[in-house]
Image (cartoon, coloured by chain):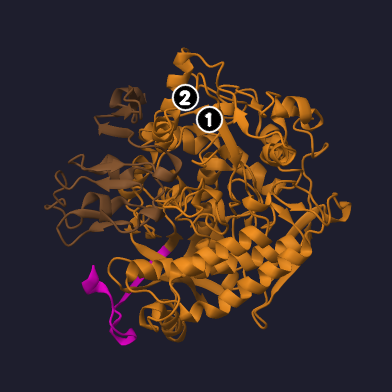
Chain colours: A brown, B orange
Amino acid sequence: MPPKVLLNKCDGCKAEHEPLCEQVCPGNLMTLGSEGKAICRDLRDCWDCMSCTKVCPQGAIETRMPYQIGYHPAKLIPMMGTNRITWTCVDINGKVERFIVKNRNEEEDED
Amino acid sequence: MSNSIPQALQSVQEVQLETDILVIGGGNAGCFAAIEAKKINPDLKVTIMEKANIDRSGCLAGGMDAINTYIPEGKTPEDLVRWSRSQAGGILREDLALEISKNLNEPIEEWERWGLPIKKNEDGSYKFRGQWDIAIQGSEMKPILAEKTREMGVEIINRVVATGYLYDGEKVVGAMGFGVRDGKFYVVKAKATIMAAGGAGGIYKPYTNDGNDCHHQIWYCPFDVGSGYALGIRKGAEMTTFEMRWSAVRTKDFNGPIDTISVCYKTPMINAKGEKILAERYKEFGGDKAPRYIRASAPMEEILAGRGPIYVDTRQMTPAQIKELKTDYLNERPSFVLFLAANGQDISKEPIEVYGSDPYIVGGHTASGYWVDTDWQTTVPGLFACGDVAGGVPNKFVGGCCAEGMLSARGAIKYIAGIDSIDADLSAQIETEKARVFAPLFSDSDGVLPHWMEEKMQRIMDEYAGGVHQFYRLNEERLDNALRHIRMMREQVKYLYAKDLHELMLAHEVIDRLDVAEVLIHHLKFRRETRWPGWQTRMDYPEIDPTLDCFVNSRVNPETGEVEVFTRPYEQILPGDRMKPTL
């Protein structure tokens, strides 16, 4: 059941005309619920692209594996930095792995 | 959003726009087409009509870990086309493939300058992971491309779903669509129109959605639903090679990419007995370098023969390689790493299980799509096509789709040279299309929900038109059954009911998929042979028929509405055995 919105963290991106997750979701799935928090209108239609999870400024969205194809609980959390993402993965046995991945060239890389 | 839902057809607001070049679909190919047009002539108005948001739309939403075709030093475009021809079972448009190959490297080098990290060797050269593939760190490649598209001054209309072309006689002069957020009807007149709306996912039922909450656990982008083809089909554009379906070996249950593992880390595919399937059983097809359809069908044949499950054997990989492999996945389909974690799987001890995907219609991988000329103009004047929606050239992948975007823009610019303005009276077709588009909002709520029809279509196609549950196998009588049901559903789209604009989009997605499915069935029926086992396995015609060494094309007859199927000859430019990758 892909994006899980953590209600204690989501503020609905108050300053934006639409929450950022709603702005980017390629499936038009994220929207603002009546409580002023983001919701995924149809979990079944998510592609797990993690665009919403990466763009959320509050870290309020977790991508989850549908239980039908993976056990509970496992986590994969991206932290967006400048020109890199730090991914933290925790498997069902509590084993933690960390990955730091460059995702953009820096100015000086370009020449 | 509820305020934006029109309460009656008369209250639908209309937005009228005019542009020089309209690009439908701002994915990889569409953005490159728009950028190229602005580069050639910054004074041109170029508009992208995009169903989602170009920052994360299309196949690159999650990212990409490689560019599968880049021509290394010492190799030529001709070498690539020979390889691609053999991988596709000897059928491809050599004229188009050569032109794409000559323009292949330029867009990738540009993307790197715009910010896309490409992995390098110590001497600074690109790091190849296979014969033609270079490794990239592309998780943010789409936002990088979107930024450049905006910077070039392209007008972008996000969240507008294209539904139909505008016509002036035989010519296409733009397109219409509806705003999935604002509920407005958009009419965009254009001197030339470039279709770049992607291929078709979700025509078939995936095995991953059997009664659970992961309906879209598919390899291809599930939001690319074949609308690009459907708009052309409805207006009589010629389509080619739909019967060359794309299905592939993917990681089981997750339905994720496998080349990352098998190409990059040279891990063999093994059966339950530990035999290296390709090397030991498919030697005569080239073993691990066998054509892609052989690699797709091999594991499924093994399972049918009682030698499953099938794995990609990761147990020889070093810890550093496993870390790098996971990093590659984080750049392309990040949640595969979550999938492994959710199964507590240590791939140094337990190999990764693989299985066949559901079939897709996708011109970036096979040859399905619009039949185009060497300016990338379709058989309809004023309409160009590029990327997954354009036919004739298999194995384009990301790089080939970029190059094709550029080439289609050059064709469109040539075409508009003599056109001053669009003066035709389009009001009748605008009214007709608007009524068709918004109908599901105003139909009886005791009707048919888009999901129901989608699921029914996917099940019918899976069972009768060779889906993964049927091991891709086809025969005439089952195809006739599929055709009967698809036609029945096409009759019943009048009962579709949508309670909001999102469901209106879903309704049009199923309408478009049904149009694609019907054409696909006609193509599958016409090719009474088995040319690409796995992609197109005719149990009633298991051999190759030499008289079908040609393109199978189709067109909807505008008078009768019937799909007419015919052939076009193969034109060989590069000499040599078409089944051999080298001279």
Q: Which residue is drawn at 14% across and 45% down?
A: A8
Magenta-colored stretch includes residue B300: no
Question: How many C-alpha atoms fall within 10 Å of the one at disc 1: few (<14), some, or many (≥20)?
Answer: many
Residue range in magenta is B1-20
Q: Which of B207 and B502 lies nearest the eye of the viewer?
A: B207
Q: Can residue B370 be seen in this view?
A: no
Q: Distance between the residues labelled 1 and 2?
A: 7 Å
Outermost residue, left side:
A15
Q: Position of residue B522 (x, y in %)?
A: 71, 66
Q: Does the magenta stretch include residue B19?
A: yes
- The dot on residue B260 is 1
- Of the two numbered discs 1 and 2 on the same chain, state the one appearing first in sequence: 1
The kind of residue on which mark 1 rests is Thr
Name the one closer to the observer, B378 or B225.
Answer: B225
Q: What chain letter is assigned to the residue under label 2?
A: B
Image coords of residue B545 (percent x, y): 86, 53
Q: Where is residue B247 in the image (x, y as percent from the top left)?
A: 62, 46
Identify the residue shown where x is 43% and y is 38%: B333
The reply to whether residue A30 is visible in this rendering is yes
Q: Is residue B539 left or right of residue B259?
A: right
Q: Is residue B171 left or right of residue B174?
A: right
Q: Quick one: label 2, few (<14), some, or many (20+) residues within 10 Å?
A: some
Q: In which quarter of the image is residue B117?
A: top left
The disc placed on residue B325 is: 2
Quarter of the image where the N terminus of chain B is located:
bottom left
SS of the residue at dot 1? helix
Q: Is label 1 in contact with label 2 (beta carbons under 8 Å)? A: yes
A35 lies above or below B7: above
